[in-house]
Amino acid sequence: MSTASLDCLIAENLAHWPEQTVYASRDTQAVHSPLFPVEQAAIVGVSAQRQREFAAGRFAAHAVQAKLGFPPTAIPMGEDRSPIWPAGMVGSLSHTADACIAVGALSHRVQAIGVDVESLVPLEDTLHPDIASPAELACLDSPPGLAALRIFSMKEAAYKAQYPLSQAFCDFDALEVVPEGLRFRHSVAPFARGTILPIRQWTGFGLCLSLCLLKRPA
């Protein structure tokens, strides 16, 4: 789905978008200006599609930097393949085949962000057990295939949000869907067992968009 679809989905739900954050979208099929050298080096030898997706993500991230008042600087890729944001801000990236989104916030207000965007297409039945339990699927008012997709997106966003704090790789069963969001089934330092990661999710225009925002303690 295009960036127009993504922008329409956010615009339709702007009243529920967290005021601490800014976002930018970019078309993965568009031609962009050159990347910073360290960013370009990260995609040497990869497929043309991956190069386009990476470039779109970085240009969306640069736009987020500008919206937050930061000068344009490189956003390198870490050894774990996650983006390394400049001091003073946190952020997250996600993309479909056609559209990319970057979300960012000032780090003195927000600890971490996780965003995920997916095409709104039901997942095959054989994939459901790897993503969610029958009880989790029943928590959502959607047919099983779409419920599985929505939970996949929720867990992807939550994983991205928790990772900068825990540095832990979590399987899908590490988090379970509850009415308040996603709950850790067991402790993953610094998150205690039972910790809730809040999730906002919107669907429409052929897309599913999930956002996990971990605020600074008051």
Image (cartoon, helix red, strand yellow):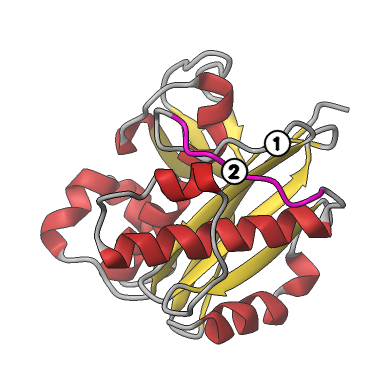
Q: Amino acid at mark 2?
A: Ile
Secondary structure at badge 1 equals: loop
Secondary structure at badge 2 equals: loop
Q: Is residue 69 visible?
A: yes
Q: Quadrant of the image for the N terminus?
A: bottom left
Q: Is residue 199 visible?
A: no
* Magenta stretch in the rendered image: 71-78
Q: Evaluate if marks 2 and 1 touch, with contact meaning CB atoms under 8 Å apart.
A: yes
**Res. 75 mark:** 2
Q: Residue 7 at x, y = what percent?
A: 63, 79
Q: Amino acid at mark 1?
A: Pro
Q: Quadrant of residue 150?
A: bottom left
**Res. 86 mark:** 1
Residue 73 counted in the magenta span? yes
Residue 115 counted in the magenta span? no
Q: Give the residue at x 26% y 53%.
A: 46
Q: Quadrant of the image for the C terminus?
A: top right
**Res. 48 mark:** none
Q: Nearer the viewer, residue 131 or 11?
A: 11
Q: Residue 157 at x, y = what percent?
A: 50, 48
Q: Residue 29 at x, y = what percent?
A: 42, 78
Q: Give the residue at x 50% y 67%.
A: 100
Q: Is 94 displayed left or right of 70 in the figure?
A: left
Q: Is 36 displayed left or right of 107 in the figure?
A: left
- CA distance separating discs 2 and 1: 7 Å
Majority secondary structure of the magenta segment?
loop
